[in-house]
Amino acid sequence: MADGKPERRGSLLGIPPPEPPIPERGPPLTSSIELRYIPLCVDLCHWINDYTGVSMEVNQFWTLLQDGCILCDLMNKIQQQHCVNIEETYQYVGYTLKRDLGDQLFYVRLNVETFIRWAKNFGCDKELLCQVGHLVERKDLERALSCVHAVARRVAELRMPYPKCVKLEVKFNMSYNDIVDLFDEHHSSLNEDQIHVKKCYADLCEQLGLGKMDITKPLKSNSSEWKSRLSDLWIGERPLTNGNIEPIPE
């Protein structure tokens, strides 16, 4: 151990293993994307977990998606369910698994490209899809979010399980951005229907583990609360660590 850090285990030749093409941890969610999109990202974590069973540390949402493995798993699970629904033969769409990525960014880019191409063929609005670099190089995560959101909307059109945020969009015939924009308006200027939309959005945020919202205040007033709650928010089974393993009773 050097400088208090564990030494990396090398091969028999003393050569250290390759660094992964995507770091294991990246910036937290609140530092990666605009505040208004935090509830949508949390909701998509739930939705992805429902389809794939993959546990997700919400604060690392983008780092988890960055190598394309989870997205391609989602792609195959959705495609399989769709084929069952329309009584067609399902064909697995190949991609490079996480354990096989090595240190090659090429395979990461190929995974994300595979997902984007599939989304286009699946019937998503191509104007809402992203480019590989938007996610892999984190050049435009809002555009990458638009791509995943577009898949969720397409799944809703095909009457398959879809996220709660999309259910709000369908229920009120409003886009996610239009719903959130209501929080930028002076509360007293809104009509009863608009206030009801805000209440439903606030209820959803509470269900997602983001806490209660004061709908009379701007969305940015929730920044500190959301940042605090996201610091320890997991969707699915949280991996065990030495710190949370209960001792065996004698």
Image (cartoon, grey):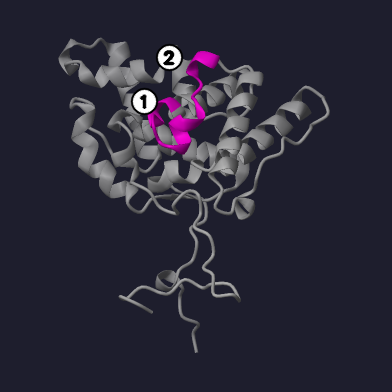
Query: Which residue is at 23% across, 29% downward?
Result: 219
Q: Residues within 10 Å of mark 2 (few under 14, many from 20)?
A: some
Q: Which residues are magenta?
A: 126-143
Q: Using the image, determine if residue 158 lies above or below residue 105.
A: above
Residue 75 at x, y = what percent?
A: 64, 34
Q: Quadrant of residue 96?
A: top right
**Disc 1 + disc 2, Cβ < 8 Å:** yes
Question: Is 176 drawn above or below residue 109 in the view shown?
Answer: above
Count neighbours of disc 1 (C-alpha within 10 A) and say few if under 14, some if 14 to 19, many if 20 or more. some
Q: Tell me where residue 49 appears, x and y as whole percent.
A: 55, 43
The answer to if 136 sits in the magenta stretch is yes
Q: Quadrant of residue 72?
A: top right
Residue 91 to residue 230: above or below: above
* Residue 19 in the figure: left or right of residue 36: right
Q: Name the residue carrying label 1.
A: 200
Identify which residue, 107 or 155, lies in the foreground.
107
Secondary structure, mark 2, is: helix
Residue 210 in view in this figure: no
Residue 209 coordinates in the image, percent (x, y): 37, 43
Quadrant assignment for the N terminus: bottom left
Distance from label 1 to label 2 (Cα)? 10 Å
Q: Position of residue 152 (x, y in %)?
A: 54, 26
| Residue at horizontal 39 percent and vertical 29 percent from the top | 140
For residue 104: magenta? no
Q: Main secondary structure of the magenta part?
A: helix
According to the image, label 2 marks what residue? Answer: 172
| Dot 1 amino acid type | Cys
Q: Residue at horizontal 40%, vertical 31%?
A: 141
Mark with earlier residue (1, 2): 2
